[in-house]
Image (spheres, grey):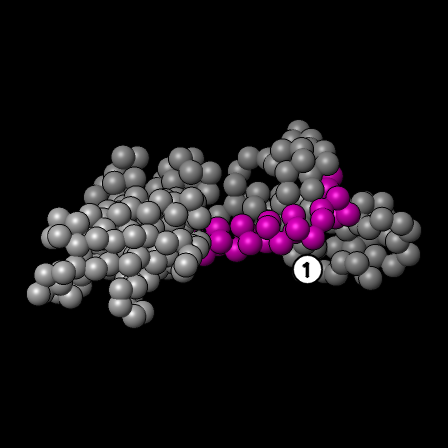
């Protein structure tokens, strides 16, 4: 479903090339209901363009920058040369993600047992797009914080449950991985079991703090007494460092309560 409104000047848009003329290329702006736009030949590439087909062809998808919009006349001027490779990659990625998110939403709500109408689907889609800016961003947030994010927007719980299930199944959040080390010793006769339980508790505590399908994980490994490795997977380095520090402190404090001791090393000494 395309949007009814018009793009803004300076916006990057996905276009499908429809017809080539001597003066430029007519395109349909995919994200705006197929509204017609024109890439003048002077905006196709830097320098002189002798043959337009050397740069674009019919039915090709291209990323353009909006130069001018006249909604009254139904006219959009576009530029191909004003978009660099980095912008092109990012826009295509964003567009593909949005297409996937639309399919996920339909999968969640139009299949049994819900089978909502196309009107209801469009209403929920609009509600999510208005709240998050894009459907894909909405799905990412649902994975991070759970279905409550949807319910707070007025979406029925049964619909929120279905969307959340599809989200955690399909969305893979970006993540980073770091490791740290602890040295743990305990003089008691069952010291080995105390250390083992302390590390199990570290992993369990991290699981309890997770919300929704958030990209966060703590794992502990034995690498040779008295040293143990703690591996943390989180959404960014700042968060990962904080989780690693908390995990190490939790293990060390557990040992101290049982007459043992411990030390944390970001890297092996």
Give me the residue at 76% from left, 58% from top: 56
Where are the magenta residues, as a range? 74-103
Counting from the top left corner in percent of width and height, residue 189 is at 8, 65
Quadrant location of residue 42? top right
Number of residue marks: 1
Looking at the image, residue 167 lies above or below residue 150:
below
**Residue placed furthest toward the bottom:** 224
Counting from the top left corner in percent of width and height, residue 148 is at 25, 40
Give me the residue at 29% from left, 52% from top: 263
Nearer to the camera, 29 or 79: 79
Nearer to the camera, 163 or 90: 90
- Locate residue 23 relative to residue 257 in the image: left or right: right
**Residue placed furthest toward the left:** 189
Residue density around tag 1, few if under 14, some if 14–19, many if 20 or more, within 10 Å: few
**Residue placed furthest toward the front:** 187
Quadrant location of residue 122? top left
Based on the picture, tell me whether residue 105 belongs to the magenta stretch: no
**Residue placed furthest toward the top:** 72
Report the residue marked by disc 1.
Answer: 60
Q: Evaluate whether residue 127 shows in this view.
A: yes
Q: Evaluate whether residue 111 shows in this view.
A: no
Question: From the image, which quarter does the C terminus lie in?
Answer: bottom left
Give me the residue at 73% from left, 42% from top: 78
Q: Secondary structure at mark 1?
A: loop
């Amino acid at each position: 479903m395309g949007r009814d409104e018009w793009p803004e000047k300076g916006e990057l848009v996905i276009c499908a090339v429809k017809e080539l003329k001597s003066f430029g290329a007519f395109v349909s702006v995919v994200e705006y209901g197929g509204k017609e736009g024109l890439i003048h030949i002077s905006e196709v590439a830097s320098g002189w363009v002798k043959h337009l087909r050397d740069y674009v062809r019919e039915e090709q998808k291209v990323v353009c920058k909006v130069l001018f919009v006249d909604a009254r006349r139904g006219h959009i001027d576009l530029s191909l040369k004003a978009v660099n490779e980095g912008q092109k990659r990012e826009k295509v990625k964003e567009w593909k993600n949005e297409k996937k998110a639309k399919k996920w939403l339909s999968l969640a709500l139009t299949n049994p047992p819900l089978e909502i109408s196309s009107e209801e689907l469009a209403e929920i889609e609009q509600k999510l797009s208005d709240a998050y800016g894009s459907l894909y961003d909405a799905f990412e947030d649902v994975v991070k914080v759970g279905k409550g994010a949807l319910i707070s927007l007025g979406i029925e719980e049964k619909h929120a449950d279905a969307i959340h299930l599809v989200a955690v199944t399909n969305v893979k959040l970006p993540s980073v991985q770091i490791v740290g080390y602890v040295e743990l010793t305990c003089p008691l006769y069952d010291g080995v079991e105390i250390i083992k339980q302390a590390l199990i508790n570290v992993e369990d505590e991290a699981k309890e703090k997770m919300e929704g399908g958030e990209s966060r994980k703590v794992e502990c490994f034995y690498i040779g007494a008295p040293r143990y490795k703690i591996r943390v997977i989180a959404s960014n380095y700042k968060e990962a460092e904080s989780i690693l520090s908390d995990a190490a402190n939790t293990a060390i404090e557990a040992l101290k309560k049982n007459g043992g001791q411990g030390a944390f090393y970001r890297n092996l000494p």
